[in-house]
Amino acid sequence: MIMKFLHKLASPPHFYRLVGRLIPWLGGLCLLLLLAGLYGGLVLAPADYQQGEGFRIIYVHVPSAWMSLFIYMVMAGAGAIGLIWRIKLAEVMTISSAPIGAAFTFLALVTGSLWGKPMWGTYWVWDARLTSELILLFLYLGIMALYGAIEDKRTASRAIAILALVGVVNIPIIHYSVEWWNTLHQGPTVTKFDKPSIHLSMLIPLLLMAVGFKLYYVVTLLMRARNELLVRERNSRWVAEMVTGK
Amino acid sequence: MTPARKKRLTLIISLVIGVGIATGFALYAFNQNLMFFFTPTEVSQGKVPNNTLFRLGGMVVDGSVSKAEDSVIVKFDLTDNVNNVTVVYDGILPDLFREGQGIVAMGRLNANGQFMADEVLAKHDENYMPPEVRDAMQKSMGEKMKGATTP
């Protein structure tokens, strides 16, 4: 039953139609969550005992940093599925994830840098956390460049899947860098087995933002995947039927 | 799963494991270079290079900060709760600098074992809470928790 549904979903015309209906709903939910999270974070949450109002950049910085890691894992996972089962849709998901992941990584680096100047006293230091996150940005950009450099898109998908899988080693390094080495960046606040070291009134907007960012990724991924599918399948019958209205 | 797929799956898993092990060894070999700063204990054990710039990280000892009257030279002790190193810094301190705060200073040791800093960065901790919660926590933990130390 589930396998049958998945199998049907993985067929490009079904995916295109079903996802087209889903996108407005997911987009609306995403907007609601982001508005609630921003209002909670920027207005309702109290100022921090040490950093005052400046800590509020956490509501953009931390969710984007989480997303930069999460999207990479999804991308590498889809890459592996594409490599093993040669599913077209998985290949489309791999390349469609890369620019979104790169954007979140860039956002995490920039907001972190702007946060670092007033709190640490510097925009940038070469500590393990910051450097490994920068390498992640280069991985995303490398994947996009490699995909663009190969003419045949199925070959290109296989190449970037391998590159993405090699880069997976960076993900635990980024996450644990603050524990394995002395870094200027502080340790994890929420993503640890212990109780989060952030007050509940500040944590709730943060989680709302995190879910909102995740939905934003889902929506943009699906939109990108639809476009990519159309381009790849431009010579197939279902695209022709859709364009001409049968 | 067909044999071809199984083969590809095995290849991918071994690729990821292989890269993981190789990176693990490389990082292990470079462990010391990846440390952003040395601790006061490492300084007292003589593990730090002589006459070269390095970073020193630790907590500012309560009541150790003394400012010169006619300049911006500051003197304070850094501790990792085992050993202390005296730091001398001529410059503007970051906003988060305060007693009990974690900081990272870059500079070199002079002949008296004092650390002459060229740059001082504040390291903030992973705790976020409203000031009232902070006050309540300090009250309940008694007078031991003066300043802004990590609980």
Image (tube, coloured by chain):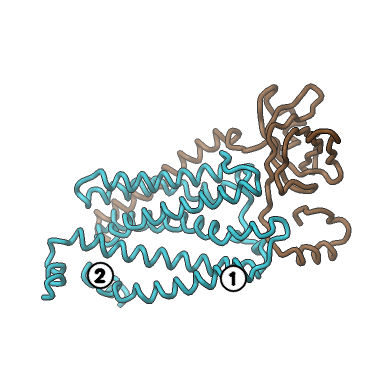
Image quarter in which the N terminus of chain A is found: bottom left
**Which chain is drawn using cyan?**
A
Q: Nearer the viewer, residue A220 or B33?
A: A220
* Colour assignment, chain B: brown
Residue occupying the point 30% across, 44% down: A146
Q: Amino acid at mark 2?
A: Tyr
Residue occupying the point 64% across, 48% down: A118
Q: Amino acid at mark 1?
A: Gly
User: Height in image: B135 above or below B57?
Assistant: below
Q: Position of residue A197 (x, y in %)?
A: 67, 61
Q: CA distance from mark 1 to mark 2?
A: 35 Å
Q: Are marks 1 and 2 in contact (CB under 8 Å)?
A: no
User: Height in image: A63 above or below B105?
Assistant: below
Residue A14 left/right relative to A44: left
Q: Nearer the viewer, residue A203 or A15?
A: A203
Residue occupying the point 55% across, 37% down: B28
Q: Which mark is residue A40?
A: 1
For the residue labelled by badge 2, is the local secondary structure a helix, a strand or a loop?
helix
Residue A181 position by quadrant: top right
For the residue labelled by badge 1, is the local secondary structure a helix, a strand or a loop?
helix
Q: Nearer the viewer, residue B71 or B24?
A: B71
* Residue occupied by mark 2: A16
Frontmost of labels 1 and 2 is 1
